[in-house]
Amino acid sequence: MVLEAEAVLGLIAFCDGGQAEILSSEALLYESEQSNLAIRREHTLAILAKAKKLISVTEKDKKRAAELTASGIKPLDALHLALAESGNADYFCTCDDKLLRNARKIKGLSVKVMNPVDLVQEIEK
């Protein structure tokens, strides 16, 4: 858990340094606003405010999300993945092990799903 937290901070710094971009979406904003912890909500919204691009949900994204739920992915997570694809993201970073496992089974997913530690190792290559 500590290693993941450090990796997330490193990824944020990497993006702050202009070496990568954070994408935001209507689904990310929605989910962050649902947090019961004010500090978590404020921190998440501050990170998302750094995004250069906000991806809006379209009917195409909703349809893609529905397809992804057939792979065992929860509806909101499926929408996050669909929006990452729609925004042409190279990577989708998550600490959700179940989402990682299920996403890796999807053939033709156009975004690489990784946990923060693996993503740091990937970009350091």
Image (tube, helix red, strand yellow):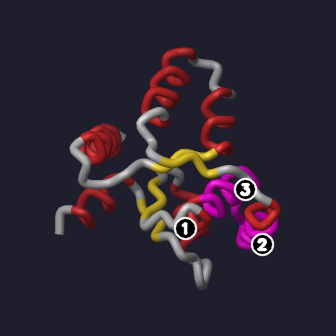
Amino acid type at circle 3 is: Lys
**Which residue does the image show at 32% across and 60% down from the upper left?**
119
User: Compared with residue 96, is residue 111 higher up or lower down, i.e. above or below?
Assistant: below
Residue ranking furthest to the left: 125
User: Compared with residue 123, is residue 6 higher up or lower down, i.e. above or below?
Assistant: above
**Which residue does the image show at 67% across and 43% down from the upper left?**
26
- Give the number of the disc on residue 101: 1
User: In terms of sequence position, does the residue under pointer 3 or pointer 1 come before the other?
Assistant: 3
- Give the number of the disc on residue 39: none
User: Compared with residue 49, is residue 107 higher up or lower down, i.e. above or below?
Assistant: below
Highlighted magenta segment, given as a residue range: 63-83
CA gap between label 3 and label 2 equals 11 Å
- Give the number of the disc on residue 74: 3
User: Compared with residue 20, is residue 102 higher up or lower down, i.e. above or below?
Assistant: below
**Which residue does the image show at 63% across and 58% down from the upper left?**
83
Q: Counting other residues with Cα less than 10 Å from the Cα at mark 3, is it few (<14), some (14-19), or many (20 or more)? A: some
Q: Is residue 24 left or right of residue 9?
A: right
Residue ranking furthest to the front: 52
Is 73 a magenta residue? yes
Look at the numbered discs 3 and 2 and tell me whether their residues touch, using CB distance below 8 Å.
no
Q: Foreground mark, 1 or 2?
A: 2
Is 111 a magenta residue? no
- Give the number of the disc on residue 67: 2
User: Residue 2 at what x, y percent from top left?
Assistant: 30, 38
